[in-house]
Amino acid sequence: MRNDQRNNHISIKLRYLLADGWESLEALDWNSVGFNFYADHDIRDDVLHLKRGLIRLDGSIVWRARANDSEVLLGILINELLYEASQAASINPI
């Protein structure tokens, strides 16, 4: 379970480099060490070349999952519900 503060009230729009050119991605939540995003393409490289405006940076992909399997999707939903319940419990203890 993650216990780092996550921010998800806004999103960060970035572009990442694929062989054919720059593609868009949107980071929906993040913490002090990184951010989560969903991509339309299968990204095979461990290092991802990113840019936002004129700023360019390299990022390391530390975890990935294909979300086209119903078990994976169910696991994502359960993890999000558990996270929300744990956050609510820590704010409003019983």
Image: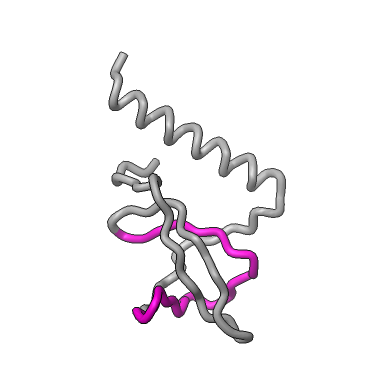
Q: Left of 65 or right of it: where is 1? A: left
Q: Position of residue 65 (x, y in %)?
A: 59, 58
Q: Position of residue 53 (x, y in %)?
A: 39, 76
Q: Residue at x 53, y 77 (%)?
A: 45
Image color mode: one colour
Magenta range is 33-55
Q: Residue at x 41, y 60 (%)?
A: 12
Q: As displayed, is residue 53 above or below residue 36?
A: below
Q: Left of 84 or right of it: where is 25? A: right
For the C terminus, give its image quadrant: top left
Q: Nearer the viewer, residue 19 or 25?
A: 25
Q: As displayed, is residue 66 above or below residue 75?
A: below
Q: Residue 75's image quarter?
A: top right
For the N terminus, give its image quadrant: top left
Q: As displayed, is residue 33 above or below residue 19?
A: above
Q: Left of 3 or right of it: where is 27? A: right
Q: Position of residue 74 (x, y in %)?
A: 63, 40
* Residue 82 within the magenta-colored segment of the rendering: no
* Residue 44 within the magenta-colored segment of the rendering: yes
Q: Nearer the viewer, residue 18 or 53?
A: 53
